[in-house]
Amino acid sequence: MKTLSPSYRTGDLEKILVSEESISNRVEELAGELSAIYENRDVTVVSILSGALVFTADLLRQLEFPTRLDCLRAESYGNTTESQSPPRITNPLKTDVEGKHVLVVDDILDSGRTLQSIVEYLKQAKPASLKTCVLLDKKERRKVAIDADFVGFEIQDAFVVGYGLDFAERYRNLPCIGILKQAFQEAAAHRV
Ligand code: IMP
Ligand code: MG
């Protein structure tokens, strides 16, 4: 059997869903919307690792209000494309967000279980306000009643990689977002 090696370019993608240029334009728009809402308030941005790392890095640099950055790690998937429930928060916050404005930044809303757990976890810390921002939303896949306050793009029901999103920790470095070829999903699953 021929061994497939993952590429660092877009050749392993079946289809590009969101181009690098579209992402960049939308991130700028989102930053504008957020800056208009938060005005000059001090906001703790909580980035959900590892998927939201790339999105957060780009968004953060365009926010026109004072920020603190903190991170949470929520583990919902092993190395498969199906989520386990409920996700575990494996890396707690470093800062105290009691009485603070909190903006959660995540890569993608799928079943909604991850964001729901994170929102519940953060509410216990009694923030002054709590809003959520996701780059991608797969609305059709929702299993729990949750929507994000800010959404970059609504996408079809497909497993996507790139711009921070991974399959078995690979492809996070692609500058665009696309559907991974089936053969690479299978190859990556066998290699872990
Ligand atoms: P949920 O709990 O089912 O909403 O899943 C959310 C998390 O699963 C996201 O933060 C991602 O890390 C991961 N995820 C969901 N869909 C995809 C996908 O299409 N590609 C890569 N990761 C995904
Ligand atoms: Mg992830």
Image (cartoon, rainbow, N blue to C red):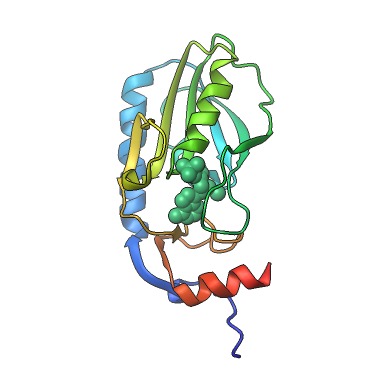
Q: Quadrant of the N terminus?
A: bottom right
- Compare residues 22 and 52 and report the one nearer the observer: 52
The spot of residue 144 in percent (x, y) is 41, 34
Residue beneath the point at 52% across and 57% down? 81
The answer to whether residue 41 is above or below residue 8 is above
**Residue 91 falls left or right of residue 52:** right
Residue beneath the point at 54% across and 57% down? 166
Can residue 164 be seen at all in this image of the molecule?
no
**Residue 5 falls left or right of residue 153:** right
Q: Quadrant of residue 145?
A: top left
Residue beneath the point at 61% across and 85% down? 3
How many numbered discs?
A: 0
Q: Quadrant of the C terminus?
A: bottom right
The spot of residue 167 in percent (x, y) is 55, 61
The answer to whether residue 181 is above or below residue 93 is below
The answer to whether residue 123 is above or below residue 27 is above
- Compare residues 9 and 5 and report the one nearer the observer: 5
The spot of residue 24 in percent (x, y) is 36, 50
**Residue 66 falls left or right of residue 169:** left
Residue beneath the point at 57% across and 59% down? 80
The answer to whether residue 172 is above or below residue 58 is below
- Compare residues 26 and 169 and report the one nearer the observer: 169
Can residue 27 be seen at all in this image of the molecule?
yes
Name the residue furthest bottom: 1
The spot of residue 147 in percent (x, y) is 36, 32
